[in-house]
Image (spheres, grey):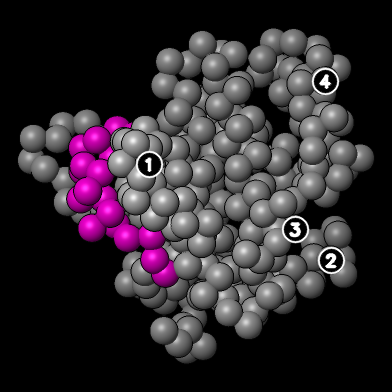
Amino acid sequence: MATHNISGLAGWVAFLSQADIPVLKQTARELAALRQDANRLSARNVADAIAADPMLTVKLLRYLQQHKRRSQTSEVIVVEQALLMLGVEAFYDKVPATPHVQDTLQGQTNALVELLRVVHRAHRASGYARDWAIRLNDMHYEEVRIAALLHDLAEMLLWCHAPQEMLNIHALQQQDKTLRSRAVQEQVLGFNLPDLQKTLVKEWNLPQLLLDLMDDGNASKPRVRCVALAVNLARHSANGWNDAALPDDYQEMGDLLRIPASDAMALVAPDEDNSCDLAQPH
């Protein structure tokens, strides 16, 4: 679909609400392999494949919300629960792992690399959030993990559908490191990505719990703070483990987990592999 005539927050919300959400090609390959292997085809294995892909995860949750049964009284944001409610075969039929981001961004290698960097960052954030939620004895730690995984969904979608605009934003920020992300986004797009994210989650009728957990404005709540800090740590460490913002992240992480900042730092850096394997087009 052509996107050059789309403008403003309302225009992009309308477009993204009609556009099919692309998924990672490696996710599609894994799901196809599972479907062909009766010994490995299970709700758990399929859920694990889905849960690693933020775009397929939200695609599943959105479908479930759109086809919610009257008997469903609680919101579901955990992938395995969603899959069990829908059924494995129904998932394959109703929520296909197409189109692929690599096809959507064919000929846009630079944008594809940047998109995969964001996905890799989301994976790291989700891992941090899950680990910290477990340390805090959160029995529903998977909800926290999903919220961190999907925190920057709007950015991923715009890398897919507005690659030139996103490359312009990236170039401006590379030229001047002091520029605030929201200001640059508003300059180029006419709106900022957090506002797009909130509007999409509401427009798509995604679970309120997911919206609450992804809302940095609720950072006084421990679970939201866990998500926000995980996202920040993943974003800052992606710039290298000498990023100037990391000491503050370690301090906040220590406050969250009630441990010294030095112990917090030891949990995540510097021995962690900071390579970006996902940032290679496949």
User: Which mark is on residue 46?
Assistant: 1
Q: Nearer the viewer, mark 4 or mark 2?
A: 4
Circle 4: is it few (<14), some (14-19), or many (20+) Cα within 10 Å? few
User: Which mark is on residue 266?
Assistant: 4
Whether residue 117 can be seen here: no
Residue type beneath disc 2: Gln
Q: Nearer the viewer, mark 4 or mark 3?
A: 4
| Rendering quarter of residue 87 | top left
User: Which mark is on residue 16?
Assistant: none
Circle 3: is it few (<14), some (14-19), or many (20+) Cα within 10 Å? few
Element at badge 1? Answer: helix
Circle 1: is it few (<14), some (14-19), or many (20+) Cα within 10 Å? many
Residue at the spot x=8%, y=40% of the render? 70
Q: Quote the CA–CA distance across marks 4 and 2.
A: 29 Å
Asked if 133 appears above or below 92 in the picture, the reply is: above
Q: Are marks 4 and 2 in contact (CB under 8 Å)?
A: no
In terms of depth relative to the viewer, which is nearer, 43 or 33? 33
Q: Nearer the viewer, mark 4 or mark 1?
A: 1
Residue type beneath disc 3: Arg
Q: Nearer the viewer, mark 2 or mark 3?
A: 2
Element at badge 4? Answer: helix
Residue type beneath disc 1: Val
* Image spot of residue 66 (x, y percent): 21, 53
Whether residue 177 can be seen here: yes
Asked if 38 appears above or below 129 in the picture, the reply is: below
N-terminal-most mark, 4 or 2:
2
User: Which mark is on residue 180?
Assistant: 3
Tell me the residue that label 2 is attached to. Answer: 174
Element at badge 2? Answer: helix
